[in-house]
Amino acid sequence: MLRNFGFAATLSLLALASPALAGNVYDGSVTPSDTTVVLITGAGYFPETVYTVPGAKIRFVNDGTSSETVAALSNGWSISALQVGEYEDIILTSGIELSYSSGQTDAFVGHISYDAPPSQ
């Protein structure tokens, strides 16, 4: 399912859908039913590292200015070209590649971690 979001709506969605990031405080409450949003900005991913749990959903939202793809570094999974404002979800399964980059270039890399985030 693809939808268009404005920048403000995307940021609101990020805050609401990412308990691991809400208020920049990790409370350990991420569950497999949670969705964490990763913005594709054209200059990188926000957040660059996602802290979550196996079974959770990661939503990649193209918040850039051109079409973007995302692919695991080991070619284990990929997301087809997302137009500006579109999104696609992946479900974190056992053994899934946890590092990813743009399918067109490895200029920026994002990471998924099952560890608790570092203290602020």
Image (cartoon, rainbow, N blue to C red):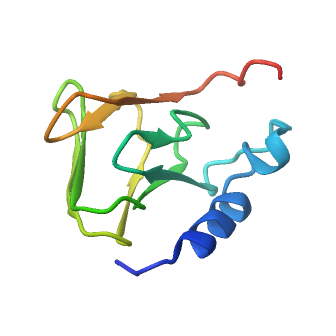
In the displayed structure image, the side of residue 52 where residue 79 appears, left or right: left
Which residue corresponds to the image point at 35% horizontal and 78% vertical from the top-left?
2
Q: Nearer the viewer, residue 93 or 113?
A: 113
Left or right? Give the position of 28 relative to 101.
right
Quarter of the image where one finds residue 45: top left
In-front residue for pair 64/47:
64
Above or below, 118 against 40 in this view is above
Residue at left offset 40%, top offset 81%: 3
Residue 98 against residue 69 in the figure, above or below: above
Residue 103: horizontal and vertical position, in percent? 17, 41
Q: Using the rendered view, name the quadrant where residue 99 is placed.
A: top left
Q: Quadrant of the N terminus?
A: bottom left
Specify the quadrant that holds the C terminus.
Answer: top right
Residue displayed at 79% across by 50% down: 22
Q: Between residues 42 and 57, which one lies in front from this camera angle? A: 42
Q: Residue at x 33, y 30 (%)?
A: 108
Q: Position of residue 39 (x, y in %)?
A: 47, 53
Q: Position of residue 23 (x, y in %)?
A: 84, 48
Residue 64: image quadrant is: bottom left
The mark total stands at 0
**Horizontal and vertical percent position of residue 17:** 66, 61
Q: Is residue 20 above or below residue 72?
A: below
